[in-house]
Image (spheres, coloured by chain):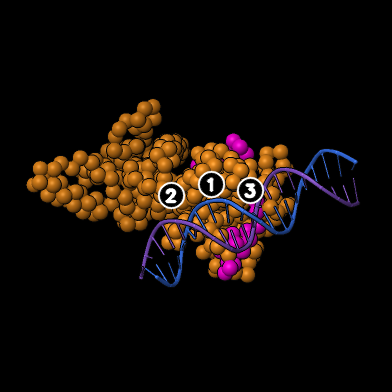
Chain colours: A orange, B purple, C blue
DNA sequence: GCTGGCTCTGTCGTGTAACC
DNA sequence: GGTTACACGACAGAGCCAGC
């Protein structure tokens, strides 16, 4: 999701000096020096950018002050990223904090820009597995690699997997933000919009997978029939399928899909809670949780019996709504998130789809 | 292969601002 | 007013390359 290398197609690879790392007591360096011709799309004057720092399994979006030294000749050169104030959470300060924990290691930095003009910094310590990969990819230290270099495509391929792999937590947060509308400052509006689009695609793919699964069940006479509400157009109903298990018995199915693990939060609107709460006793409601959607083998767990949870939440919503009315305020819509393990009494073992 | 000039990068002295 | 932190930029040295 994050990974689209900037069209300048340059990657810098540098061994960091003790002064870069802030490890030399006599040094006063307040920046890490970078090389020219990488991040040339940024202005010469110092600008604050969002940057992703990756170090082993650590991945975080931090502030980064990028710029160049203004020489007396008027030339702008020697690009660098500044440390900022001591307590400021910047790329340089975080790199120096990691380096201070292993003062005997050698440290390397890989950096490049994304099409979104965000920056990526990959910090590597000489005692890490990443260092072995980096040594294979980059045969020469302290060099700028471009698309004509054999290392470039190798590096992009490895870094794409690395960035997408270690940024799972960030992507989970964005998936949540896309479903709830929650504003998180570090994510740009485009990221949320992309995640929202992706989430809708994943939601529809999940429903398609369940439609195929139910078709097989129907042929095996495990169920008598089913109806897919969104097969042609989005129905707007608070459920996705109705399954007929016997002549009269109806089971309302809501398919909740995620690229991540089973226990990622499920999100309900107050309308969905009201619908489930209002079901008659002869009707059933289940969530078909489709997870690991990024893998070739998607997984399913069927979750049933959430009436106790729904009754409690519905009462709380009604109570809150009533209290708001007392101060001439209406409760227009609510989104609630809950982990499947915390709201369903019966959760069936996983099925590989 | 050697030399000299140019470019690039890292180091660190110094001025300034912030803080106590 | 003294101390500390930070930013700026001069300068040294390494690396590169053209000319011989």
- Horizontal relation, residue A193 to residue A297: left or right: left
For marks 3 and 2, give the CA distance: 34 Å
Closer to us: mark 3 or mark 2?
3
- Tag 2 secondary structure: helix
Chain under numbered label 1: A
Magenta residues span A1-26
- Tell me, yes or no, whether dots 1 and 3 are on the same chain: yes
Q: Which numbered disc, 1 or 3, marks the residue that appears first in the sequence?
A: 3
Is residue A13 in the magenta section? yes
* Place of residue A27 in the rendered image (x, y in percent of width and height, measured from the top left): 58, 65
Is residue A326 in the magenta section? no
* Place of residue A257 in the rendered image (x, y in percent of width and height, measured from the top left): 41, 44
Furthest toward the left, the residue is A326
Closer to us: mark 1 or mark 3?
1
* Place of residue A312 in the rendered image (x, y in percent of width and height, measured from the top left): 21, 54
Q: Which numbered disc, 3 or 2, marks the residue that appears first in the sequence?
A: 3
For marks 1 and 3, give the CA distance: 11 Å
- Tag 1 secondary structure: strand
Task: Identify the residue shown where x is 55% and y is 62%.
Answer: A28
Locate residue A332: give its quadrant. Answer: top left
Furthest toward the top, the residue is A232
Chain under numbered label 2: A
Residue that label 2 marks: A172
Residue that label 3 marks: A35
Magenta segment, prevailing SS (helix, strand or loop): loop
- Answer yes or no: do the residues labelled 1 and 3 have beta carbons within 8 Å? no
- Tag 3 secondary structure: loop
Task: Identify the residue shown where x is 10% and y is 46%.
Answer: A327
Chain under numbered label 3: A
């Amino acid at each position: 999701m994050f990974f689209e290398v900037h069209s300048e197609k340059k990657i810098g690879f540098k061994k960091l000096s003790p002064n870069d790392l802030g490890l030399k007591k006599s040094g006063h360096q307040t920046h890490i020096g970078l090389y020219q011709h990488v991040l040339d799309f940024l202005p010469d004057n110092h600008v604050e950018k969002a940057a992703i720092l990756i170090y082993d399994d650590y991945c975080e979006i931090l502030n980064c002050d990028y710029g160049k030294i203004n020489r007396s000749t008027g030339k702008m050169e020697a690009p660098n990223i500044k440390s900022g104030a001591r307590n400021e959470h910047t790329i340089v300060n975080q790199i120096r904090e990691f380096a201070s924990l292993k003062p005997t290691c050698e440290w390397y930095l890989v950096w490049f820009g994304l099409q979104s003009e965000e920056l990526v910094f990959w910090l590597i310590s000489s005692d890490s597995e990443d260092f072995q990969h980096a040594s294979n990819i980059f045969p020469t230290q302290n060099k700028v690699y471009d698309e004509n270099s054999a290392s470039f495509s190798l590096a992009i391929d490895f870094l794409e997997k690395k960035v997408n792999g270690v940024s799972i937590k960030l992507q989970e947060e964005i998936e949540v933000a896309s479903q709830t509308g929650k504003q998180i400052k570090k994510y740009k509006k485009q990221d949320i919009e992309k995640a929202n689009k992706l989430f809708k695609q994943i939601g529809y793919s999940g429903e398609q997978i369940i439609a195929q699964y139910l078709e097989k069940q129907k042929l095996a006479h495990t169920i008598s029939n089913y109806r897919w509400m969104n097969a042609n157009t989005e129905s707007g109903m608070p459920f996705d399928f109705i399954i007929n298990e016997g002549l009269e018995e109806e089971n309302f199915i809501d398919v909740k899909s995620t690229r991540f693990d089973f226990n990622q939060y499920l999100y309900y609107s107050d309308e969905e809670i009201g619908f489930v709460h209002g079901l008659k006793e002869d009707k059933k409601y289940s969530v078909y949780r489709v997870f690991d959607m990024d893998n070739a083998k998607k997984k399913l767990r069927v979750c049933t019996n959430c009436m106790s949870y729904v009754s409690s939440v519905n009462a709380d919503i009604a109570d809150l709504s009533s209290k708001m009315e007392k101060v001439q305020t209406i409760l227009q819509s609510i989104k609630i998130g809950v982990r499947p393990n915390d709201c369903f009494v019966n959760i069936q073992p996983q099925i590989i789809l």
